[in-house]
Image (spheres, rainbow, N blue to C red):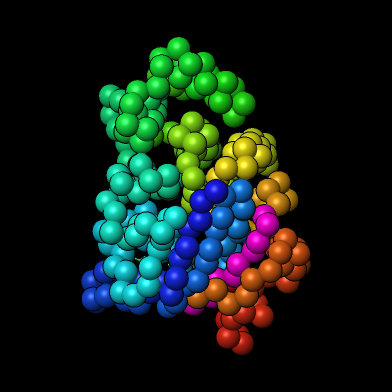
Amino acid sequence: MSTLEIRDLHVSVETKEGPKQILRGVDLTVASGETHAIMGPNGSGKSTLAYSLAGHPKYQVTAGTVLLDGEDVLAMTVDERARAGMFLAMQYPVEVPGVSVSNFLRTAKTAIDGKAPPLRTWVKGMRSAMDALRMDPEFAERSVNEGFSGGEKKRHEILQMELLNPKFAILDETDSGLDVDALRVVSEGVNRVRAGGEAGILLITHYTRILRYIKPDFVHVFVDGRIAEQGGPELADRLEAEGYDRFLPTGASA
Ligand code: ADP
Ligand code: MG
Ligand code: MG
């Protein structure tokens, strides 16, 4: 049983005009086995939360704490965060020419576990995970992110999550740009990790669409860098029906 505890998190981002305050006191606790949806209008700071947890250098934590089972996540390097069990899909968004998906994933697994997984079981596990995500076996030999379509990137992201077996997974807009079939396959992958019961999942999304396939235990609505409202899955249903209008200043829309 693990806990990720975000307390009073304030974050500013470096812009051309100087630092800009984005997160203004985020409080959120996620335990193993729980799925939390972070929703909210565009520009409310959802991705900033994800980047801050990932340790992106552009995002400066100006106050607050993030603890993983009591350990100070903000003091960790990006690699240390991964070894501590945090999975952040945007950690490796770049193209890695000449490095195959297969080698890349095995290297990541080795770095996280501190030892290489036995080749046979690893290959078997990778094949079955790819099969479940309805990925062509040849995908394993392609260079990471090189010419990946939007859907391939998302499947690759979920494949990583399934194979790396994290304590906490932060998925930012995993649903964006997916057609209904791809959305279902990707959601099934998230639900498999969830069914394992060991991971805590932070599912960040502007849209309610993916929540038809993944039923969150808790829903948090982000507005202007803070959580403005929280509830259970019924809150997502309400957002689907009403949108974000009631959270915004009169006259604005998102
Ligand atoms: P969301 O994911 O909810 O749409 P973001 O976290 O992407 O929100 O953005 C929150 C606010 O921070 C927006 O006003 C956005 O323009 C600003 N912002 C985020 N990242 C940067 C950046 N790298 N440079 C300048 N402004 C940024
Ligand atoms: Mg945005
Ligand atoms: Mg975003």
Taking the image as shown, residue 5 lies to the left or right of residue 38, namely: left
Identity of the residue drawn at 37% across and 57% down: 71
Q: Is 183 located above or below residue 248 in the figure?
A: above
Where's the C terminus, which quadrant?
bottom right
| Residue 86 in picture, x, y percent from top left | 42, 47
- Residue 174 seen in the current view: no
The region drawn magenta spans: 216-225
**Eyeballing the image, is 82 above or below 11?**
above
Query: Is 224 part of what is drawn in magenta?
Result: yes
Q: Is residue 25 magenta?
A: no
Left or right side of 143 for 167: right
Q: Position of residue 60 (x, y in %)?
A: 29, 68
Q: Which of 249 and 166 lies nearest the eye of the viewer?
A: 166
Q: Quadrant of residue 110?
A: top left
Q: In the figure, is residue 158 to the left or right of 24?
A: right
Which residue is drawn at the image coordinates 37% and 32% (left, top)? 113
Q: Main secondary structure of the magenta part?
A: strand
Q: Compared to 225, does 59 lie above or below?
A: above
Residue 167, given in percent of the width and then of the height, sits at 49, 45
